[in-house]
């Protein structure tokens, strides 16, 4: 499989989704289903880091999966951080947010895993101080 989903930490507060080389739309949908099942196994909110730095291409009809992804937006999903997402996919997510608001809420973009960890720590610190998540590009 070209998309790997695993817990990023022992506390199971963060999912790590790593895209390897070429991946298919079916693998993408399966990874969303796996992520949902993993979030269902815990009782607390979960953040997701999606690492696309090793991706060489993107499947056609990716936008066609938006309805499925919206339906699989788990109520305990909090922040989603994308690493290495190309500008055109950022635009695609922006467009998709119009008809998939749950799946596209609280998304952030970073260039490296270290940057993603730092961003997530900052978001969590801000959340603990004011209690309100906020979406920022």
Image (cartoon, grey):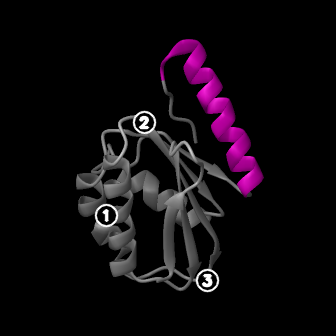
**Local crowd at mark 3 within 10 Å, few (<14), some, or many (≥20)?**
few
Neighbourhood count class around disc 1 (C-alpha, 10 Å): few under 14, some 14–19, many 20 upward = some
Residue pictured at 48% horizontal, 20% vertical: 132
What's drawn in magenta, residue-wise? 113-132
Residue closer to the observer: 100 or 26: 26
Residue 122 vertical position relative to residue 19 in the rendered view, above or below: above
What residue would you read off at disc 2?
45
Mark before the other along the chain sequence, 2 or 3: 2
For the residues bearing labels 1 and 3, Cβ distance under 8 angstroms = no
Which numbered circle lies on residue 33? 1
Q: Which is in the foreground here, disc 2 or disc 3?
A: 2
Question: Which image quarter: residue 33?
Answer: bottom left
| Residue 124 in magenta stretch | yes
Q: Position of residue 87 (x, y in %)?
A: 60, 62
Instruction: Determine the secondary structure under disc 3.
Output: loop
Q: Disc 3 designates what residue?
A: 56
Image-based side of 61 in relation to 78, left or right: left
Residue drawn at (33%, 80%), measured in percent from left and top?
26
| Label located before the other in sequence (1 or 2) | 1
Instruction: Provide residue 133's location: percent of width, then percent of height.
Output: 49, 27
Q: Residues within 10 Å of mark 2 (few under 14, many from 20)?
A: some
Closest to the observer: 64 or 51? Answer: 51
């Amino acid at each position: 499989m070209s998309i790997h989903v695993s817990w990023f930490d022992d506390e199971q507060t963060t999912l790590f989704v790593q895209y390897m080389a070429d991946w298919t739309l079916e693998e993408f949908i399966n990874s969303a289903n796996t992520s949902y099942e993993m979030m269902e196994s815990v009782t607390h909110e979960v953040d997701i880091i999606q690492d696309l730095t090793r991706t060489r291409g993107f499947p056609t009809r990716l936008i066609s999966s938006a309805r499925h992804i919206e339906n699989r937006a788990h109520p305990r999903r909090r922040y989603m951080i994308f690493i290495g997402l190309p500008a055109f996919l950022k635009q695609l997510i922006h467009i998709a947010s119009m008809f998939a608001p749950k799946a596209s809420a609280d998304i952030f973009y970073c260039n490296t895993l270290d940057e993603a960890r730092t961003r997530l720590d900052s978001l969590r610190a801000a959340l603990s101080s004011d209690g309100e998540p906020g979406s920022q590009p």
